[in-house]
Image (spheres, rainbow, N blue to C red):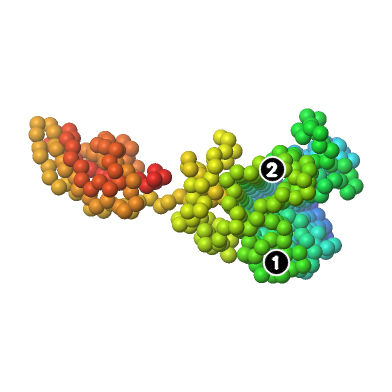
Amino acid sequence: MYSEPNTTIRIADGTYELHGANLWIDTPGVTLCSASGNREAAVIDGDYETTEMITIAASNVTIADLTLKRAYTHPIHVVATPDGDTENTLIYNVHIIDPAEQAVKINPDEDRTHFPDGGLIACSHIELTDAGRPHIRNGCYTGGVDGHQARSWVIRDNIIEGFWCASGLSEHGIHFWTGSRDTVVKRNVLIDNARGVGFGLGESPWDDPWRTYDDDPCPGADHVGHYDGIVRNNFISAGRDALFSSSDGFDCGICLEQACGAQVLHNTVVSADAPVSSSIEWRFGNTDATITNNLVSHNLQQRDGASASLAGNLEEVPLSLFVDGAGGDLHLVGSASLAIGRGVAISAGLCEDDIDGDLRGPARDIGADECIPPPPATVTDLRVGTAITGTGVLTATLRWTAPADAVTTTLRYSGTLITAMDWAAASLMTDTLSGSAETYTAPVPCGGDTIYFALKSQNAEGA
């Protein structure tokens, strides 16, 4: 695709069949997107004739607001070239359907001297459906996002689902390996994939050497599949009978192999049946991980000499802790006392919010969801019981019915009607009443005009 640098190419709504052609972007700064911003309305169809549909071989390229479907190999392939690194790829709000190999492939150049670094995949939907599954070849050589020797990618706020085969073991929904580094995987929903999130794979290189770094982040380690990085606040579920009855079933939710310095924090991994391996596992001698505050339906497992620091994790939990454990909605129900408020403290800045962006409280919940109780019921019967006037002063006794779940009560007054918008501007009467209080008497300034009163009740979370 010829284009001037920093050009935006907008595709009108419609379906475009490639008939074996592909789009090769080797000009930096190009944006390829739909004109309407509706990803479902602008569709590029490879019809299993086109191999790679979009190849990104330049830095600062954006693919956004499109649907890509039925690639013979990869709908999107990010590659470094002999001329330099490919950096700062952005894949945003893209729907990828039924790739015959990995949906997003990320590779260095052939000589392994230039690398694809600093990319972002966000707010996208990547799926393999029953219609596409028969087109998978080579022993189930498919997967969601597959990154080789890639550094500082962020994979966030995506839905990735369905990567499994009747015969053969699929790669992961999200996978970075062969010496990748500093990957951040957060706030994703992974549904019915044979393997969820993977850092590293295998004990040592099969052919080409893995990427290493001049600053030697894991001293003394000969073969590192993944350096550092963090997996946090993800929902990973497996519930489909066809997946469990396939030849390889549901293998693992989060899988670390030769993953030095990986952090696995506040994830929820739930499967309707037992995984073949484990909900979360760490494997091989160069794996040294931190695994904290994860909530899983089955087991955590150490394998083959790996090491990990474990704290605050909860294993073998029932599906009743979740809104719809069998269906993949892994938000906690209000009665999930096994997990609510039971997490351990972690270092500031590592995981301050949850999968929905809600801030975690001081007593953090285990898993990806911080269960936020609803605010107390609105008080609808605030009234002035008695009012005694004096010179410039009104002494009012207020009465109301306290909500059952209120912990504190705040009262304010004003010379104008108090709404939600100007609540904070109204004068404070008290913010120290208990939630069970149902009466309060206090003097307020009065010049003979109307005085308005308003009340807010708060729960233990301050809502």
Q: As rendered, which of 217 and 385 lies closer to the eye?
A: 217
Please tell me which residue is depicted at 69% across the width and 67% down the height of the picture.
244
Please tell me which residue is depicted at 12% across the width and 42% down the height of the picture.
387
Please tell me the numbered disc located at residue 243. 1
SS for dot 1: helix
SS for dot 2: strand
Q: Amino acid at mark 2?
A: Ala
Residue placed furthest toward the front: 305
Q: Amino acid at mark 1?
A: Leu
The image position of residue 357, as x and y in percent, is 53, 46
Q: Kindly report the distance in space between the C-alpha atoms of the residues bearing marks 1 and 2.
A: 29 Å
The image position of residue 364, as x and y in percent, is 51, 44
Q: As rendered, which of 90 and 375 lies closer to the eye?
A: 375
Q: As rendered, which of 333 and 116 lies closer to the eye?
A: 333
Judge the density around disc 1: few (<14), some (14-19), many (≥20) Cα neighbours within 10 Å: many
Please tell me which residue is depicted at 32% across the width and 40% down the height of the picture.
422
Q: Earlier in the sequence, mark 1 or mark 2?
A: 1
Circle count? 2
Q: Is residue 290 above or below residue 163?
A: above
Please tell me which residue is depicted at 86% across the width and 40% down the height of the picture.
112
Q: Is residue 342 above or below residue 330?
A: above
Any part of residue 35 in sight:
no
Residue placed furthest toward the top: 215
The image position of residue 32, as x and y in percent, is 70, 48
Q: Which residue is mark 2?
A: 308
Any part of residue 442 in sight:
yes
Judge the density around disc 2: few (<14), some (14-19), many (≥20) Cα neighbours within 10 Å: some
* Horizontal arrangement in the rendering, residue 188 relative to residue 411 (left or right): right
